[in-house]
Amino acid sequence: QVQVVESGGGLVQPGGSLRLSCAASGTIFSIYRMGWYRQAPGKQRELVATISWSGGSTNYADSVKGRFIISKDNAKVTGYLQMNSLKPEDTAVYYCNADIRTRWNSASRDYWGQGTQVTVSS
C-alpha cells in the first residue's frame, strides 16, 4: 500500500511564498515521476509542474513558469513545490501525484494525495 501526503498549504498575501511538500511512503519499488496539480472552485484540475524521479527533468505550466520551482529529495522520498510571487489566481487545492511501481513485476500507477488548500489573498 502506498500513501501520498501533501503539506504546507495555507493563506498568503499576494507576492508571498509558500513551499508545499509531498511525502510518499509504503511499499515502493520505484518512482518514475511526481507532479503537482491544482483545482480552483468551478474549474477543472490542471497540471502545475512535474519532475522525473531519476533524471530530474522538469515541466511547468506556462502560468507558473519563472515563479514556481519543483524539486525532490530521493532519500526522503519527498517532492516539493516552491511557490514564489503568488497571485490571487493561484488560489486552489493543490494535489500531489506520483507514478509508482510497488513490485518489480507490476505496472506503475498513479497515486494521489488528499490535497492541500492554498489561498492567496490580502
Image: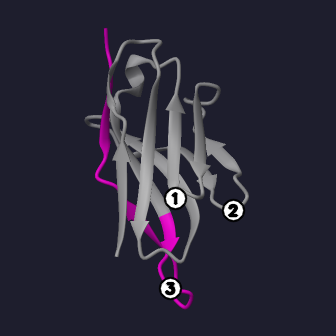
**Closer to us: mark 2 or mark 1?**
1
Membership of 40 in magenta stretch: no
Q: Mark 1 packing: few (<14 Cα in 10 Å), some, or many (20+)?
A: some
Q: Distance between the residues labelled 1 and 3?
A: 16 Å
* Label 2 SS: loop
Say which residue appears at 38% left-offset and 18% top-offset.
88
Q: Give me the disc on residue 77.
A: 1
First in sequence, mark 1 or 3: give its number.
1
Q: State the residue in front, 47 or 19.
A: 19
* Label 3 SS: loop
| Residue at mark 2 | 54
Q: Is residue 95 left or right of residue 117?
A: right
Q: Give the range drawn in magenta.
A: 99-122
Q: State the residue in front, 1 or 50.
A: 1
Say which residue appears at 51% left-offset and 38% top-offset.
81
Q: In this view, does 42 lie to the left or right of 57?
A: left
The picture places residue 6, in percent across and down from the top left corner, at 36, 47
| Residue at mark 3 | 103
The picture places residue 76, in percent across and down from the top left corner, at 52, 56
Q: In this view, does 122 lie to the left or right of 50?
A: left
Does residue 56 sit above or below 1 in this rendering? above
Q: What residue type is labelled 2?
A: Ser
Q: Mark 3 packing: few (<14 Cα in 10 Å), some, or many (20+)?
A: few
* Label 1 SS: loop
First in sequence, mark 2 or 1: give its number.
2
Callout count: 3
From this viewpoint, which residue is outermost toward the bottom? 105
Q: Distance between the residues labelled 3 and 2?
A: 17 Å
Q: What residue type is labelled 3?
A: Arg
Q: Distance between the residues labelled 2 and 1?
A: 12 Å
